[in-house]
Amino acid sequence: MTAKYYEAIAEVPADHCLRLQLAPEIPAGPVRVAVIFEGAPSTRPSGQDIKDLLAAMPDVGKDEDFSRPRNQ
């Protein structure tokens, strides 16, 4: 099965209940729905999110396990 993409722009009402009329070429049946929205601008320093993610990752192995021998 080949996934296809359909985009529509909508306004989320105060009750957060969204009704969307899809194009007729989209067949009835199960679909995946993604909601993409603009978040508030971050007040954190640039790059801090990735630094926090990396810091939260568990330590696995030893540094030597991830290094390549140098050609001398």
Image: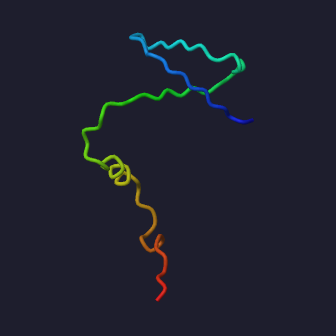
Q: Residue at x 33, y 46 (%)?
A: 49
Relative to 69, residue 53 above or below: above
The x, y position of residue 11, in whole percent, is 44, 16
Within the image, what quadrant is residue 13 found in? top left
Left/right of residue 19 with respect to residue 59 in the rendered view: right
Relative to 18, residue 60 above or below: below
Q: Residue at x 49, y 85 (%)?
A: 71
Q: Residue at x 25, y 46 (%)?
A: 45
Left/right of residue 43 with respect to residue 4 in the rendered view: left
Q: How many marks?
A: 0
For the residue pair 17 and 52, the one nearer the viewer reads as 17
Relative to 46, residue 11 above or below: above
Relative to 60, residue 71 above or below: below
Quadrant into which the N terminus falls: top right
Q: Residue furthest right?
A: 1
What scheme was used to colour the molecule?
rainbow
For the residue pair 70 and 7, the one nearer the viewer reads as 7
The x, y position of residue 30, in whole percent, is 67, 23
Left/right of residue 1 with respect to residue 70 in the rendered view: right
The x, y position of residue 19, in whole percent, is 53, 12
The x, y position of residue 51, in whole percent, is 33, 52
